[in-house]
Image (cartoon, rainbow, N blue to C red):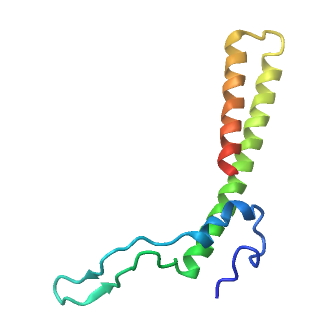
Amino acid sequence: MFPGIDGVKGVKNKDGVRQYDKMKRKAKPAVYDPATKEELIPAVREGQPFADNVKAAGIEARTLLDDMGKVLINGLENHKNSIRVAFKHMPTQRVNKYLKNVDKNIKTIKEGME
C-alpha cells in the first residue's frame, strides 16, 4: 500500500509532491485487440485514483527534478562568477545584460522547483 507523502523517506519537497495524492484519472474507454476482441487495457472511470506505483513514480520524478534543478542553479552561479572574473576589468553593457539574463534564468528555475 502507498504510504502517502509523509510516509515516504527521502522526499525533500513534500508540499511540491502532495499533488500526487489528490490527482484523479479522467475517464477513458477500454482498449481492445482488433483481431481477438480481447480487452488489452481496462476502462477507467472518472475520478478513479492513480495506482500506487504511479504515485510513487511521480514523487521520485519530482525529487530527481528538484535535485537536477539545484545542480543547474549551482552551475549557473559558478558560470556567472567566472564571467565576472573574466570581464572584471572591462564591464560592458553586454556583459551586464548577459549576467542579468543568467539571473533571470536562475529565478525561473527556482520558481519551477517550488
Q: Is residue 23 left or right of residue 94?
A: left
> Who is closer to the viewer here, 49 or 35?
49
The picture places residue 104, in percent across and down from the top left corner, at: 68, 31
When the figure is inspected, residue 42 is found, relative to residue 6, above or below; the finding is below
Q: Residue at x 69, y 62 (%)?
A: 63
Q: How many numbered marks does the figure carry?
A: 0
Q: Picture coordinates of residue 29 (x, y %)?
A: 30, 77
Locate residue 86: give its quadrant: top right
Question: Residue lying furthest front in this view?
Answer: 47
Q: Locate residue 97: give its quadrant.
A: top right
Quarter of the image holding residue 27?
bottom left
| Camera-side residue of 95 and 18 | 18
The single residue placed furthest to the left in the displayed view is 35
- Residue 2 placed where, x, y %? 65, 83
Q: Give the position of the N terminus as an image quadrant.
A: bottom right
Q: Residue at x 72, y 30 (%)?
A: 103
Left or right: where does residue 4 sit relative to residue 58?
Answer: right
Q: Residue at image x 75%, y 61%? A: 13
Q: Is residue 29 above or below residue 14?
A: below
Residue at (59% x, 70% y) in the render? 22
Is residue 106 positioned above or below 58 on the image?
A: above
